[in-house]
Image (cartoon, rainbow, N blue to C red):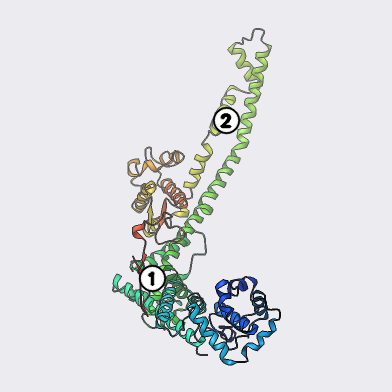
Amino acid sequence: MPVEFLTDDQGAGYGRFAGEPSRAELERFFFLDDADRGLVGKRRGEHNRIGFAVQLGTVRHLGTFLTDPVDVPWSVVDYVAVQLGVLDPSVVKRYTEREKTAYEHAWEIRDAYGYRDFSDPAAQEQLRDFMDGRAWTHAEGALALFTQATAWLRRHRVLLPGVSTLARLVSQVRDQAAERMYRTLAEAAASADAELPYRLRDLLAVPDGQRLSGLELLRRAPTRTSGVAMSKALDRASTVLAIGARAAQVQAIPTNRLAALARYGLAGKAPQLAELAEPRKTATLLATARNLEAAAVDDALGLFDLLMATRVINPARRASREQRLATLPRLERASALLLAVNTALLDLLASAPDGQVEVAAAWAAVERVAPREQVTAAAAVVEEMLPDDDGDETALRANIAARYGVVRPFVELLAEVLPLDATPAATGLLHALRRLPELLRRRVSRKPLLPGEVEATLVPALWRPAVFANRRLPAGSVDRDAYVLCLLEQLRTALRRRDVFAHPSLRWSDPRPVPAARLPVLAPHRGHGRHPVLAG
């Protein structure tokens, strides 16, 4: 058989019964309505009536007439015989005694029910249009398209051609759809930037001092959770975005076809891709680079989210708890002393006959418990260590700010590299983030940062003590490290809410629906070798 995608069993089962039909199939294809019974009733002899009805159901079910019309599962014969009131279904064996009978009945069924031969030019054009459209819009294999074409022929009452004929047509249609896609993508790359095809092909070269090609290096996602790993992830995103694949206008290509081509490019080895002929090579590399853009951005933002949680926020929370626990013994001692003083004063008040106590007597009762200075110091300790409503959260922010060393290696790259955008609610945050490289390059030890030089409105109340009231800095100056961590914490929250989003991206993209004016529309098409295109 001149087709490679069909197995021998699949080819042999084409246009044949594959085992016993189900009850639903019998009722769908072999049920005889009044019109069917009227046509069947014109036959003389029970064997002719059963044979005619079996042929009618067979062509409905399989889309073709069998060479031996009674080579069907016996359940089919029984089902038809019951409807025709034939007590002995075995009489159907006499149906083939006269060879021309089955042939004449097949022609009569074709004429009565509008079945067309595959050689009909109109039928071929309609099938070709259907296959062209499906091959262009669906990233499915040859066998799936073959199955869809067979189903289309049955639905439209076109008799099945030979298996090799249909298989060759499937291969031809798929090849033409693939060539069109390759040509369209290669032209889009050249139209966007004359140098883009060359940059794409350079991905297959092995850089000096490396053992892997540029493409294989860019495939590697970050595997560690650290500031250095985050810097490498941002460098990877920067390198991929610098290729410029996103500039190519590929709206004419269905998204699933692009994704399938990108999967092929990501799975293939560089030498294998280098051997591809043009325009397939450029098209494959373009789809792969576009996929890598989104993957690199997603990986960088995913690592940022994980890094902030595991290396910044969670350790700071643990440090806050440990600091709190460390103060408990001192607080307990001071509280115990104040409790004893309070008990002594209450006893004094209870012993006074009129409830009036002299100040000197009260102090004498206090000093019998502990010296006045010690009691005053204990009260100061309780006042200092007893947290207010936001005390724990404020301390947490101070500990987060102390983790600045974790984010220092990548903050500047994060602000400059990633293609971030924001909703109106987070536009100010994104603007402040873009200004961070300028602040990071400043030597704050020589020229302290002032409140007017930062976006003070973006600093929440819980962060204000850490940002604007660091006692280790000159009065009135801003703690730059705390300000950076303040923005990064808000960025992480905004990313999770999608108030800040990335493009290109799959995980961190804008969840808002695309305006109708920007949606691609399906352009009508007709004719062989032409495919529906998405005209944006």
Give 193 or 324, whichever is nearer the viewer. 193
Give 125 or 516, whichever is nearer the viewer. 125
Instruction: Name the secondary structure under disc 1.
Output: loop
Report x, y in % for residue 365: 64, 17
Report x, y in % for residue 315: 54, 50
What residue would you read off at disc 2?
A: 382
Query: What residue is at 38 percent from the left and 37 percent from the top?
Result: 475
In the image: residue 262, left or right of residue 373 = left
User: Is 215 located above or below residue 99 in the figure?
Assistant: above
Label 1 neighbourhood size at 10 Å, few (<14), some (14-19), many (20+)? many
Give 486 or 152, whichever is nearer the viewer. 152
In 3D space, how far apart are the residues under numbered discs 1 and 2 (Cα atoms)?
70 Å
Q: Which amino acid does label 2 sit on?
A: Val
Label 2 neighbourhood size at 10 Å, few (<14), some (14-19), many (20+)? some
Instruction: Name the secondary structure under disc 2.
Output: helix
**Mark nearer the N terminus (1 vs 2):** 1
Q: Which amino acid does label 1 sit on?
A: Ile
What residue would you read off at disc 1?
A: 253
Report x, y in % for residue 100: 56, 91
